[in-house]
Image (cartoon, helix red, strand yellow):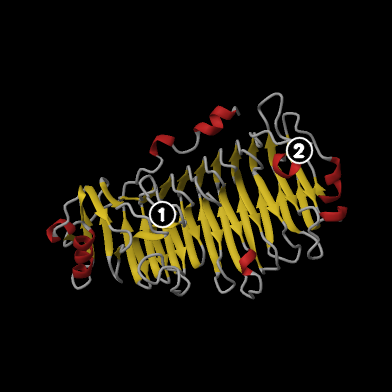
Amino acid sequence: MKLSEIRGSGPNPELFGVPATVVIDSKDAINVQNFGAKGDGQTNDTAAIQAAVDVAVAGSGKVLVPDGVYMVDALQAVRLRSGVVFQMESGAILQAIPNSSRFSAVLAIENVNNVTVLGGTIRGERKLHSGKKGEWGMGVQINGSRNILIQGTAANDCWGDGFYIGTETFVGPNAWMELFGVPENIRLIDIRANNNRRQGISLIAGINVEILRPILTNTNGTAPAAGLDIETNRNTDFLENIVVSDAFTANNQGSGITLNTERLQGTDRPISIKIINHRDEGSNRGFFTGGRGIIPGSILIDSPQWIESKQNALAILIHDYRSFFIDVCNPQIYNANRKGSKVPTTGATIAVYNFDGDEEGDGIGNIRISAPFITETEDPRKTVRGIYAWDVSGRPLQNFIITAPAYLAQIGFDESLKQYIKSSQP
């Protein structure tokens, strides 16, 4: 198969950031315009929208935001309440009013239950942001809440993240200081996040979180700058029964998906993460994970496609062999290392390594890479190696297995990997 055919099978780039079609039920819904919201792109509609939300709780629970551009004070946020179905028509935009604050959010879902958000676009103010500090200007923040569904909504151009799922607040006088419980039963379906400054989605903590068919593109500005960043803030955060399915990430300054578990050191609660059918095109890395410490649990990465990564398609750093099991199944990798790095830590298609001189722990490993398909369509090739595996002082990796590797287009086989091959194919 030609690379052009592979690329053509992904989502249409013209649809990046455009909200998916969802069914809006306007019957018995509270229309925000009946409370004075103008949607004219000039009027501050925060109070009017909040009034509609507050009234809806006592009635049908449904709020309708018709097409229009509704200016929102992200230092206050529109705060959804338990039992509310917040419906935005396809042309409805909640636009953050420019500010200089390190902390803000357009839509806040804090310490509530049974909330649904459908359709529409949340648009941040990164282009007109007048401050230079901070990275916590959120489109949608979900903290300490349960039974939350967001479907068909886009969150673009934010000073921080498009979507944030965690335990901290980012609006009001207690921004960043107030902690909530771990979010539970959270579903993001067909959401989009484009041109956000820090992350498309930050998943800081969650129990029973499903992220289905997200499109996360063009994150840039401040690290980690990932499409999806799974990264806890403290060891009391939980990452349990996390499922990310059919994610499409592209052109992110950082990785398509990043997993950083270093702040979980000391936890006795196992992480449980499944990432199924992830596809990345042109991000710095397709998938990156790293972090010291011994954290119980497992992560499954099943059937990813990583295409034209600027560095590695997959990088696993400093992963203690006693820490959670990393299982990478059937990865298909095309044309990694487009930056042309000459060193294997960044130029190999798959890199599993420790830092030179960092001998903390007894070794790295507890990783299985099954049936990797690695190819390059360009000549001369830019890929330094197919798979690179190295621990400090030349000690072998432990519990590290590669099964049935397929290297095509002159990438070749690294003889130093023989000790890790369980079986191979011609």
Mark 2–mark 1 contact, CB under 8 Å?
A: no
Crowd rating for badge 1 (residues with CA inside 10 Å; few <14, some 14–19, many 20+): some
In percent of the image, x 12 and y 59: which residue is there?
34
User: Nearest the camera: 93 or 197?
Assistant: 197
Circle 2: residue type: Arg
- Checking the image for residue 16, the label placed there is none
Circle 1: residue type: Ile
In percent of the image, x 62 and y 69: which residue is there?
264
Crowd rating for badge 2 (residues with CA inside 10 Å; few <14, some 14–19, many 20+): many
Name above or below for residue 316 compared with residue 35. Answer: above
Q: Of the residues under marks 2 and 1, which one precedes in the sequence? A: 1
| The N terminus sits in image quarter | top right
Name above or below for residue 249 compared with residue 24. Answer: above
Name above or below for residue 305 compared with residue 8. Answer: below
Residue 300 on image: x %, y %: 62, 57
In percent of the image, x 27 and y 60: which residue is there?
86
Q: Please, what secondary structure does the residue beneath circle 1 have?
A: strand
Residue 393 on image: x %, y %: 87, 55
Residue 4 on image: x %, y %: 55, 28
Judge whether residue 79 can be spotted in this image.
yes
Q: Is residue 163 left or right of residue 392?
A: left
The quadrant holding residue 380 is top right
Q: Please, what secondary structure does the residue beneath circle 2 have?
A: loop
- Checking the image for residue 189, the label placed there is 1
Q: Is residue 282 left or right of residue 419?
A: left
Q: Which residue is mark 2?
A: 385
Residue 299 on image: x %, y %: 63, 60
Mark 2 or mark 1, whichever is nearer to me: 2
Q: Is residue 68 left or right of residue 270?
A: left
